[in-house]
Image (cartoon, helix red, strand yellow):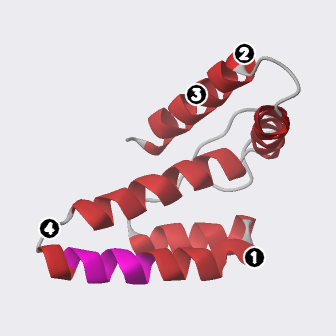
Amino acid sequence: MSAQTDGPYGPLIPTPELTPAALRAAVTRIAPSRVPALTQHLFEATANAQQTQSLAPLRAFVHSWAVFVAIERHPERAARLRELERIVDAGEQDPAEAMAQIRAIRETAEAEAGL
């Protein structure tokens, strides 16, 4: 994991390497309840990669979990994302602004993860 700081309210953990093992370790630390989902996704990605003889399923796995970790390692960002997702899911107001903010959070997370 690479060291990163952004003040006294920085991320919970450093940015992990983009490997299944490093992502699993990061998820174990910041969202242990999600480890079974990560494990299942890795199993499916590996099986699909073997079946299709392509690394694309494994790349999708790494991308998905790297973005998840990049978001969740910042509790305020993760809470904001969940709030925005609730706004969109509720359908009680125009979701355009919430969707734009969700997109921005995900793009920031992708950039931080090095994707």
In the image, which disc is placed on residue 54? 4
Figure quadrant of residue 50: bottom left
Residues under numbered marks 1 and 4 in contact, where contact means CB atoms less than 8 Å apart:
no
Q: Secondary structure at mark 1?
A: helix
The residue that appears at 60% across and 55% down in the rendered structure is: 69
What amino acid is at disc 2?
Answer: Glu
Check residue 30 for magenta coloring.
Answer: no
For this rendering, which residue is in front, 15 or 59? 59
Marks 3 and 2, how far apart at CA: 10 Å
What amino acid is at disc 4?
Answer: Ser
In the rendered image, residue 45, in percent from the top left (x then y), is placed at 34, 74
The residue that appears at 51% across and 82% down in the rendered structure is: 40
Instruction: Rate crowding at label 3 as few (under 14), some (14 to 19) or many (20 or more) other CA atoms within 10 Å.
Output: few
Q: Is residue 17 left or right of residue 48?
A: right
Marks 1 and 3: which is nearer the front? 3
- The stretch in magenta equals 42-49
Marks 3 and 2: which is nearer the front? 2
Q: Secondary structure at mark 4?
A: loop
In the rendered image, residue 99, in percent from the top left (x then y), is placed at 66, 25
Query: Does residue 7 show up?
Result: yes
In the rendered image, residue 93, in percent from the top left (x then y), is placed at 85, 20
- Per the image, the residue denoted by label 1 is 33
In the image, which disc is placed on residue 103? 3
Marks 2 and 4, how far apart at CA: 37 Å
Instruction: Rate crowding at label 2 as few (under 14), some (14 to 19) or many (20 or more) other CA atoms within 10 Å.
Output: few
Q: Secondary structure at mark 3?
A: helix
- Per the image, the residue denoted by label 2 is 97
The residue that appears at 76% across and 39% down in the rendered structure is: 85
